[in-house]
Image (cartoon, rainbow, N blue to C red):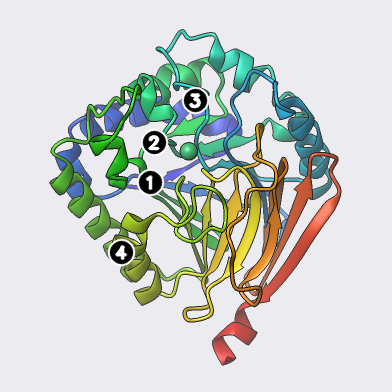
Amino acid sequence: MAWCLNQHMLSSVIIAVSVLLCLLSNHSSIAEKLPRFEHHLKPQQQSLNFLVVGDWGRKGNYNQSLVAHQMGIVGKNLNIEFVVSTGDNFYDDGLKGVDDPAFYESFVDIYTAPSLQQIWYNVLGNHDYRGDVEAQLSPILRQKDNRWVCLRSFILDTDNVEFFFVDTTPFVEEYFTDPGKHTYDWKGVLPLESYRAELLKEVDSALVQSTAKWKIVVAHHPIKSAGPHGNTQELEEQLLPILKSNNVDAYINGHDHCLEHIIDKESGIHFFTSGGGSKTWGGDIKPWDPKELKLYHDGQGFVSMQISKTNASIVFYDVFGKVLHTWSMSKKLKEAA
Ligand SMILES: [Zn+2]
């Protein structure tokens, strides 16, 4: 089943999504297939233009509002199709329920620029799992603001790129073995072993079947990062082999509150961290091979991507909208290499 999502069409699929979310409330249905969305380019648009932001929901504080302002400017210049959020959407402890005012205070009333009135494709972060997860997944939020699309894991098919959004929080052992004072809402992901195994199987199978020119995986936790959280060992062991065997072009994540670009020497996969949506950690960086680490910015900001059938242009911006780093990729060159 595929849905074509445009802003004006979103309301018509709310009912279908509601039904699907009911099905997904029991994770055994993951094995049936990941939910699939279709998003077609605006007429005359050659490249898919979008923004990526992560780790943002702090009611405008910690420069969240400034980042939002700059996103609005870049979003207008690029005539973006949508925004991708890499999770940790609401600090500190997710949403308390569908009526939590944080949804307005951290999302609706912050990202107000006209260019940002597009669909937001969201994954969940570990902080989101500390609240009522099903509230963030609820279609009621889409009735409050029809930009909001949040599922645990799903596929987004666009004309130039296929995206695979993966729910990584349930893979991190520490949240189960050493949660500290935090309480996590694991409803819908237990028993863990089968949740993880089925999800990995579905992602692998979807990637194997994909005929897209560009394949991008989006998740919250980094696989490779020089930031304070660093590599997520569980994902290095379980998800990375799937990315490698399916020639994924890029993995986009948040969690480390920075902007970062690593190119894995061995596989050529690009690891983009966009976790600078609000509070960041200055000066906290682990040693990393400079041949792989193309950018590490320990302040706020966001990323834009423009992807045509053959070329991708990635730009990192700081909190003032200043360009920190750009990278271009060519599909033809990559294939010939
Ligand atoms: Zn996080």
User: Which numbered circle lies on residue 11?
Assistant: 3
**Which SS class for mark 1?**
strand
Residue at the extreme bottom of the image, as rendered: 336
Task: Please report whichever mark, 4 or 2, sits nearer to the chain's N-terminal start.
Answer: 2
Q: Position of residue 102 (x, y in %)?
A: 55, 14
Residue density around tag 3, few if under 14, some if 14–19, many if 20 or more, within 10 Å: some
C-alpha separation, residue under disc 1 versus residue under disc 4: 21 Å
Question: Disc 2 designates what residue?
Answer: 151
Looking at the image, is mark 3 or mark 1 earlier in the sequence? 3
Graded by Cα atoms within 10 Å as few (under 14), some (14 to 19) or many (20 or more), the crowding at tag 1 reads many
- Is residue 271 shown above or below 302? below
Q: Residue 277: x and y, percent?
A: 65, 36
Residue at the location (59% across, 30% down)? Answer: 8
Q: Whole-Å distance between the Cαs marked 2 and 3? A: 16 Å
Task: Read off the residue under disc 1.
Answer: 154
Which percent across, then down, holds residue 150?
44, 33
Q: Is residue 29 above or below residue 49?
A: above
Q: Earlier in the sequence, mark 3 or mark 4?
A: 3
Q: Secondary structure at mark 3?
A: helix
Which of these two is toward me, 155 or 304?
A: 304
**Side of 152 where 74 appears, left or right:** right
Q: Residue at x 22, y 36 (%)?
A: 189
Which of the pair 17/328 is nearer the observer?
328
Amino acid found under the numbered disc labelled 2: Leu
Write the residue at 35% across / 58% down.
233
Q: Which mark is residue 237?
A: 4
